[in-house]
Amino acid sequence: MIDTIIFDAEGIVIDTETIWDKGQAIFLQRRGFVYDRERIKPLLTGRTLAEGVEVMRQAYRFDGDTEALARERADIVRELFIHETAFIEGFLPFYESVRNHYKTCVATAMDQDLLKLVDQHLNLSALFENRIYTLDKVGYRSKPNPDIFLYAAQQLGSVPEHCVVIEDAPHGIDAAKSAGMCCIAISTTYDPGKLQKADFVVNAYAEIDLAAVDQYASILMK
């Protein structure tokens, strides 16, 4: 029986894709380039700001000190996070429908400084009653390592087979499955075809059927 819902943050609770895309576009526009999202975005996923600078430098052939460029990128994105952060469409109604019936939390690899900015704007800590778990709790072992999800379950007094993770990215799905948890993927960030390792793939929160998820999880436990 599912009694715990673990939410990823970016792309699941908060719409950061729009911010990151806008940030990359501004950064490249300053150098006279147009951001080719389809080509560049997959290369940036999971990379640090400095690593992302190197990816774009190789793709677009521009000069500059890597650390300085990474700071510039960070400043652009930070400003956008302060003023333009929003919840993913459908998240709040879904969360309000489950928060009194399931244990809930956020388990995320999101940069902590950016997460603090989001918290100031959207008050996530109050919404989740301070149940927001970040990689510093697990030695910065990022997804697809399952430790962040296992830690979250432990903090909530849950066991993996009673947890469902809501994710938007392949590496997050891999982490959830490695943790022994059921996983729902929402195609907010990636095409559904790239999310097929999840137990359920939906296009929006409105399509989630927790009764079906619970039934499926019960079958897996037998």
Image: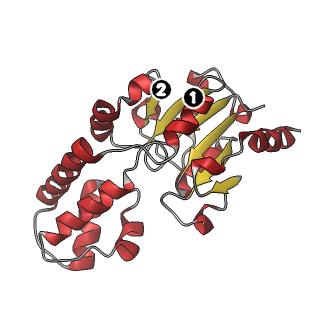
Q: Position of residue 167 (x, y in %)?
A: 55, 48
Q: Quadrant of the N terminus?
A: top right
Q: Which residue is mark 2?
A: 128
Q: Which residue is mark 1?
A: 104
Give the colouring mode of the picture: secondary structure
From what the image shows, is residue 56 above or below residue 92?
below
From what the image shows, is residue 42 above or below residue 206?
below
Which one is nearer the viewer's eye here, 114 or 143?
Answer: 114
Q: SS class of the residue under badge 2?
A: loop
Quarter of the image where one finds residue 151:
top right
Q: What kind of residue is marked 1?
A: Thr
Q: Which residue is located at x 55 percent, y 30 percent?
A: 96
Left or right: where does residue 96 sit relative to residue 15? right
Residue 85 seen from this side: yes
Q: Which residue is located at x 13 percent, y 77 percent?
A: 32
Q: Which residue is located at x 49 percent, y 46 percent?
A: 12
Q: Which mark, residue 216?
A: none
Q: Are marks 2 and 1 in contact (CB under 8 Å)?
A: yes
- Distance between the alpha carbons at the discs numbered 2 and 1: 7 Å
Left or right: where does residue 213 sit relative to residue 164? right
Left or right: where does residue 151 sit relative to residue 123? right
Q: Position of residue 115 (x, y in %)?
A: 33, 37
Which one is nearer the viewer's eye here, 40 or 82?
Answer: 82
Which one is nearer the viewer's eye here, 178 or 90?
Answer: 90
Q: Position of residue 13 (x, y in %)?
A: 46, 42
Q: Position of residue 10 (x, y in %)?
A: 43, 47
Which one is nearer the viewer's eye here, 202 or 168?
Answer: 202
**Looking at the image, which residue sits at the far right?**
222
Left or right: where does residue 16 sit relative to residue 203? left
Q: What kind of residue is marked 2?
A: Phe
